[in-house]
Image (spheres, rainbow, N blue to C red):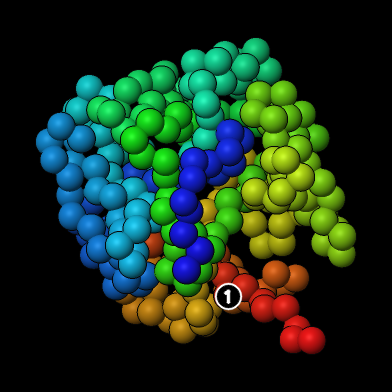
Amino acid sequence: MPTVNGPYTPGTPCWVELMVPDQQAALDFYRDLFGWEAEPGSPETGGYAVCRYKGEPVAGIMGAMNPDGSIPDPMPPTVWTTYIATSDLGATQQRVTDNGGQVMVPGMDVMTLGRMGVVSDPTGAVFGLWEAIDFKGAGIANEPGSWIWSELNTSDREAASAFYSAALGIGTTAVEGADGYFSLTVDDRAIGGTQALSGIKGLPDGTPSHWLTYFAVDDTDSTVDALVRAGGAVLMPPFDMMAGRMAVVADPQGGAFALINVKQPDAG
């Protein structure tokens, strides 16, 4: 089991979180799709639910609310947010603004778990920052039923790459055999991917820059079938690509994410 035993290196995605209008409906949907176990949290956490898989935390799901606890009007879009680890939230948010990004939710304490903030890069892609104290982030990843990859799809790849390098120490390396696709790296290790929105076939016009969350599955086609039966939508039907067989889908409340059955290396 690919469990995470130590803290995440700064600059590495460490957690994914969904904000939805109907939290319980989302908990039920992802329980049935991935086998996650979760219940709404205590009032002091705003009801935040930590979803667990094989006993380990894998993702968070929360009902949409303003920082003061009130219900948003209008309701924001349902989105999956990738959180990137930092050892100093305040300093990282300063580098974000110094390099053309924006702070959307200033750093705040989350009990004794850590400190969080939400920012956007200069192309408009939103992501979170997490400074761990008692809670490091996902305890299991890279296996069916868990988060496996986060991908930045951006309107200006060169500008975005310069920003992530300066603000978060994340490098960019071209992927051999995948024209236009780049690995995001920390300490020469791939921690995510990035590509230009203009290079993605079938993407609706006007799609904004965004981080896309990938979840690993045993069988992409059967998982897509189960998602549709549960009221989800298919944005990109299953297709074969370099890393395996993937699809881009949305849950019944509109939260988009990708599914992938990772291609195993040839034996011998």
Q: Position of residue 52 (x, y in %)?
A: 31, 59
The residue drawn where x is 70% and y is 51% is 190
Query: Looking at the image, can residue 268 be seen?
Result: yes
On the rendered structure, is 169 left or right of 34?
Answer: right
Choose top left, top right, bottom left or bottom right for residue 25. bottom left
Residue ranking furthest to the left: 43
Few, some or many residues within 10 Å of mark 1 (<14, 14–19, 20+): many
Label 1 sits on what residue type? Answer: Asn
Nearer to me, 31 or 256: 31
Quarter placement of the C terminus: bottom right
The residue drawn where x is 45% and y is 63% is 146
Nearer to me, 55 or 94: 55
On the rendered structure, is 168 left or right of 179?
Answer: left
Q: Position of residue 198 (x, y in %)?
A: 75, 49
The residue drawn where x is 15% and y is 32% is 44
Choose top left, top right, bottom left or bottom right for residue 57. bottom left
Height in image: 210 above or below 70? below
Q: Regarding mark 1 in the picture, which secondary structure is present there?
A: strand
Nearer to me, 20 or 266: 266
Q: Position of residue 48 (x, y in %)?
A: 24, 42
The residue drawn where x is 52% and y is 26% is 87
Height in image: 223 above or below 145? below
On the rendered structure, is 120 left or right of 145?
Answer: right
| Residue identifier under label 1 | 261
Nearer to me, 131 or 22: 131
Residue ranking furthest to the front: 5
On the rendered structure, is 69 left or right of 239?
Answer: left
Query: Looking at the image, can residue 21 be seen?
Result: no
Height in image: 34 above or below 79? below
Height in image: 62 above or below 237? above
